[in-house]
Image (cartoon, rainbow, N blue to C red):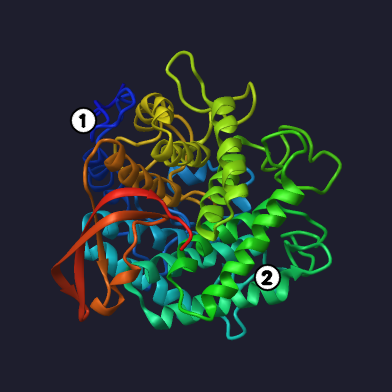
Amino acid sequence: MKRVLLSVCLLAGGNSQAAAPAIPSAQRWLESVEKELAPFWLHQDAAGHPIGNFPTYRCNDGSLYQQMEPCDDLAFAPEWMKPHLGESYTRMQARHTFVYGVIFHLTGDKQALELAKAGVDYLREHLLEEQGSVISVREAGQSIYSAQQRTTQDLAYAQLGMAFYYYLSGDQQVLADILKVKDYIFEQYWDADSQRLRWVNAPSNNGSGDEIELVAQLDQINGYMLLVSPLLPEPHKSQWDADLAKLLDTIISQFLRPQEFRFWGTKHGQEYQLDSARHNDFGHTAKSWWMTWLAAEYLGNSKLALQSQAGLKQTLDAAFIEHGEGGWRRLPNGAPAIWWEYAELDQSAATLALVDPSASHYLASTYPQWFDRFIAEDGGTYPVANKGLKIHLWKSDYHSLEHALVAYLTSAQLNGEPARLYFAMPANQAALRQPYFYQAKQAQASKVGEWQGLPISEVNYQGIGIKQHN
């Protein structure tokens, strides 16, 4: 194994159950962010021109991709990717913004916070349209798709960076734009007859308009709604909660396989039922159960929360590789999971361990494989075991940094350690300072600096658990 897991601890705190299997300490996840992930994202070529216009493509050494003199990494890119190497994707720009937000959140690094704000500012000034749509793909500075041709998934992920920055800062101007984009999505894409969000509203290379897509619903939840809904003032909170409940109903009633614990990734075409069909992997199923569980707990839907927790347990059992080095598989009897699927499965298992410590047995096996397979020796992460492009039109470290944040918070709780997070927001908005998708029994804040007139607060949490309805 490439790395020795540091500071491995057993479950502390006097739990009456037998000690859970050993997992890395919270400190190990901080070390991963500071020493293994952040250097790739703080590379001088990562900031973009102008700053905040983050590049969709960089080489594996961190340097900027040059179309006239491409590095070998991208000169020999997969054939499916080559037609898109001149394009810039807003979903990736927003995911990179999220990356910088998490680096600050976990380490207090002001440079990362500056970059997160720059990403938000660039999107709001150059990509957000007046009516609430967001340019999704550009080539030579021009939008490739009309507003009606943009996918609901791309619009959801355009919200990702703004949502996380609002969570960190409480910036009311950013919130106003988040509300505008969300309203646009539900006003323009919600199909009352089918009770789901459409994929696109007009045909293009993005789709015909007849698609029935799980991620059109699901990525609204994990991309911004689950994080932002609990932080909203009225009347917005009630409307968002109602729309969140609608999406949960759509996902369960339309995409859950009858008599099974898995979800269909799509419901159109002739072959959507094949295991190998689009989004039928364990990653999407685990993310669906994880999101429906957390959202149901937040909304007070105890029946769905129990159903989701049970479905998640079945999914984890099916996806877990018990023999050999361990890890997660992407399909029944299939190949090992790729980085984002692996991250979603880990995050789901870590969350489950907060209420069922025995779920730590997955993590005792899968966490070492995460470090061994996906963390690159020279910084960043690989998409598959120790190889592949670190960044492109569908690859960033959004999943890797969220994985680190969730692992840090849950490992702190499971190992009986406090968790520390950083925020930069006015003192009168202290109620917004929550531990990501979770809640804590105790939170103690102290001012540790300033940034652009805002106090930087270090908040120490204890008793981290599932966010409950109140």
Q: Which mark is residue 6?
A: 1
Decide which of 427, 92 is in the foreground and name it.
427
**Residue contact at pointers 2 and 1, CB within 8 angstroms:** no
Q: Left of 60 or right of it: where is 38?
A: left
Let me know if residue 42 appears in the view: no
Q: Residue at x 65, y 56 (%)?
A: 248
Q: Quadrant of the N terminus?
A: top left
Residue 81 at x, y percent in the picture: 60, 48
- Say whether disc 2 or disc 1 marks the residue closer to the N-terminus: 1
- On the image, the x and y values in percent for residue 80 come to 64, 45
- Outermost residue on the front side: it is 16
Q: Quadrant of residue 131?
A: bottom right
Residue under the point 55% across and 71% down: 140
Residue at x 51% of width, y 63% of height: 224
User: Element type at marker 1?
Assistant: loop
Front residue of 24 and 433: 433
> What whole-number distance in Å separates the C-alpha atoms at marks 2 and 1?
48 Å
Taking the image as shown, residue 117 lies to the left or right of residue 161, namely: left
Which residue lies under the disc numbered 2? 145
| Number of numbered discs overlaid on the protein picture | 2
Place residue 355 in its image quadrant: top left
